Structure formats: C-alpha cells, structure tokens
C-alpha cells in the first residue's frame, strides 16, 4: 500500500481534504487545480485502495496511517 513518504504532496492533500468533508470542487478551488485533476487523484486513490467511493478512500487512508 501507499505510505506518506512515497505519496505526492498534492495527492495526500486531496485525501486530507476529502477526509475533512470537502467536495471535489472545493478541493480544486483550495488547491488552485482543475477539478478534473482532482478527480484523477481520487480515481488513483480508489485504485490504490481497491475502493469505489470517497468514503472508502478516506477510511483506507486512516487505516493505512496516511491520515490521522
């Protein structure tokens, strides 16, 4: 699985913002990044964790120690 040392900072920020309850659009606005880029990051997390939802990705992020 992923660990903090190998995850790009933006991808980790996306996961942190999702854990805080922000929408994809809100994350994009905060990071100054197109929403499509954030959606790509979300899909990458889904694939990494083998999940289908933001909630699943966030839960795995906590379980894997990426989120605290």
Image: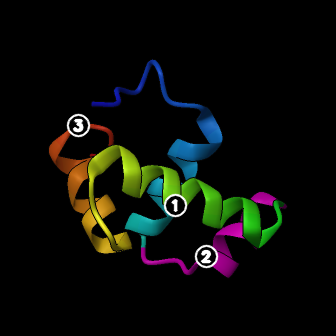
For label 1, count other residues whose C-alpha is less than 10 Å away and answer few (under 14), some (14-19) or many (20+): many
Residue 25 on the magenta span: yes
Residue carrying label 3:
65
Q: Quadrant of residue 19?
A: bottom left
Secondary element type, mark 1 = helix
Of label 1 and label 3, which has the lower sequence position? 1
Please tell me which residue is depicted at 32% across the width and 39% down the height of the picture: 66
Residue 30 pos. (x, y %):
73, 66
For label 3, count other residues whose C-alpha is less than 10 Å away and answer few (under 14), some (14-19) or many (20+): few
Secondary element type, mark 3 = loop
Residue carrying label 1:
42
Residue sitting farthest toward the top: 5
Please tell me which residue is depicted at 29% across the width and 72% down the height of the picture: 55
Q: Which mark is residue 30?
A: none
Please tell me which residue is depicted at 20% across the width and 39% down the height of the picture: 64
- Left or right side of 67 for 60: left
Of label 2 and label 3, which has the lower sequence position? 2
Residue sitting farthest toward the left: 63
Q: Name the quadrant of the N terminus.
A: top left
For label 2, count other residues whose C-alpha is less than 10 Å away and answer few (under 14), some (14-19) or many (20+): many
Secondary element type, mark 2 = helix
Residue carrying label 2:
24
Span of residues in magenta: 21-32
Residue 20 pos. (x, y %):
42, 69
- The residues bearing labels 1 and 2 have C-alpha atoms spaced at a distance of 9 Å
Residue 67 on the magenta span: no
Of label 1 and label 2, which has the lower sequence position? 2
Compared to 2, does 43 lie above or below?
Answer: below
Residues at badges 1 and 2 in contact (C-beta under 8 Å)?
yes
Residues at badges 1 and 3 in contact (C-beta under 8 Å)?
no
- The residues bearing labels 2 and 3 have C-alpha atoms spaced at a distance of 22 Å
């Amino acid at each position: 699985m992923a660990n903090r040392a190998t995850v790009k900072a933006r991808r980790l920020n996306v996961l942190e913002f999702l854990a805080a309850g922000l929408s994809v659009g809100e994350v994009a606005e905060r990071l100054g990044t197109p929403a499509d880029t954030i959606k790509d990051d979300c899909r990458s997390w889904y694939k990494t964790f083998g999940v289908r939802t933001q909630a699943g990705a966030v839960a795995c992020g906590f379980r894997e120690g990426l989120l605290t």
